[in-house]
Amino acid sequence: MKDLFNLSEDVAVVIGGTGELGGMMAEALGAAGAKVAVVGRNEERGNARAKRIADNGGDAHFFAADGLQADSLDEARQAITKWAGGPASVLVNAAGGNRPDATIPPGGDYCKLPLDAWRDVFDLNLVGGALLPSQVFGQDMIDAGVGSVINIASMSGMIPLSRVVAYSAAKAAVINLTQWLAREWATTGVRVNAISPGFFPAEQNRKLLFNEDGSYTERGGQIIGHTPMNRFGKPEELAGVVTWLACRRAASFVTGQNIAVDGGFASVTI
């Protein structure tokens, strides 16, 4: 079992590793033995995450890059290869998010959704959150004949949840791109999968789920009511699935899959 879940031969790049969920996945990969490149735009949080990995016995470094800029990603790729002594063999695309003006408020009008907001959400989640990083880092994996690309999708990509129309459509596109790339790269040794987290309270959605007194908002209560495990997820509960998908021996025949980590939410909603 130790051999199955051993990443000591791997260099893992986590785009969006400065965030709460991406950072936890970076820590999990570091704990499994990978050299971890934490990539993002926030230097303070990136360095803090790399330090946490190092403090726990791992090997990690922060690299600044903008996921929406191919040149920026390629500069990071070159710096990571030099630092690690070899190219990335694991890529986790964990960047993404939403913006308020791309969300339909209660009683709002879909016909008045600003196109610029829609485009920004699509670019952030699809272009910067999967497409460009896979292009930039994928070629090295193809050349080496081994690699694992893990895109972070969302429950919203599986189920068109109310209000978050642009985000849901973008994450659905991430799942579709995952499946397309899995077929395209299937004979190259590069596997491509997605993880769709359920509802994990984090900085960007905490106010949507909780009131200031810690009680559930109306939307938070609705989500709990549709989750058989009757609770939200914890970031560390993504550690096992990201490590499994990253490991070339444990998941050697797994590609084109979208793994839901949702406390059963999809099982009662779909």
Image (cartoon, rainbow, N blue to C red):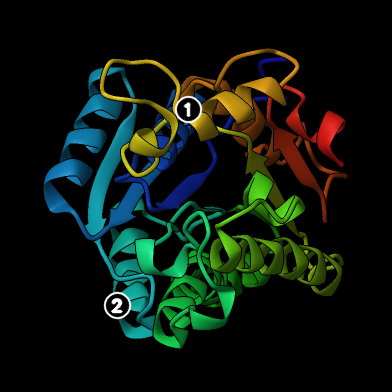
User: Residue 255 placed where, x, y %?
Assistant: 82, 52
Name which residue lies at 84% across and 45% down: 254
Name which residue lies at 78% across and 38% down: 251
| Residue 219 image label | none
User: Residue 122 placed where, x, y %?
Assistant: 52, 74
User: Residue 94 placed where, x, y %?
Assistant: 48, 51
From the viewer's perspective, tell me whether residue 202 is left or right of residue 11.
left
Q: Is residue 83 above or below residue 18?
A: below
Say few, some or many: other residues with alpha carbon within 10 Å of mark 1 (under 14 / 14 to 19 / 20 or more): many
Name which residue lies at 82% across and 49% down: 257
* Helix, strand or loop at mark 2: helix
Please report contact status of discs 1 and 2: CB closer than 8 Å, yes or no.
Answer: no
| Earlier sequence position, callout 1 versus callout 2 | 1
Q: Is residue 79 above or below residue 261?
A: below
User: Residue 92 placed where, x, y %?
Assistant: 52, 51
- Kind of residue indicated by mark 2: Ser
Q: Is residue 95 above or below residue 12?
A: below
Q: Quadrant of residue 61?
A: top left
Alpha-carbon distance for marks 1 and 2?
26 Å
Say few, some or many: other residues with alpha carbon within 10 Å of mark 2 (under 14 / 14 to 19 / 20 or more): some
Q: Quadrant of the N terminus?
A: top right
Q: Quadrant of the C terminus?
A: top right
Q: Is residue 53 above or below residue 230?
A: below
| Residue 72 image label | 2
Residue annotated with mark 1: 28
From the viewer's perspective, tell me whether residue 192 is left or right of residue 57.
right
Name which residue lies at 57% across and 82% down: 111
* Helix, strand or loop at mark 1: helix
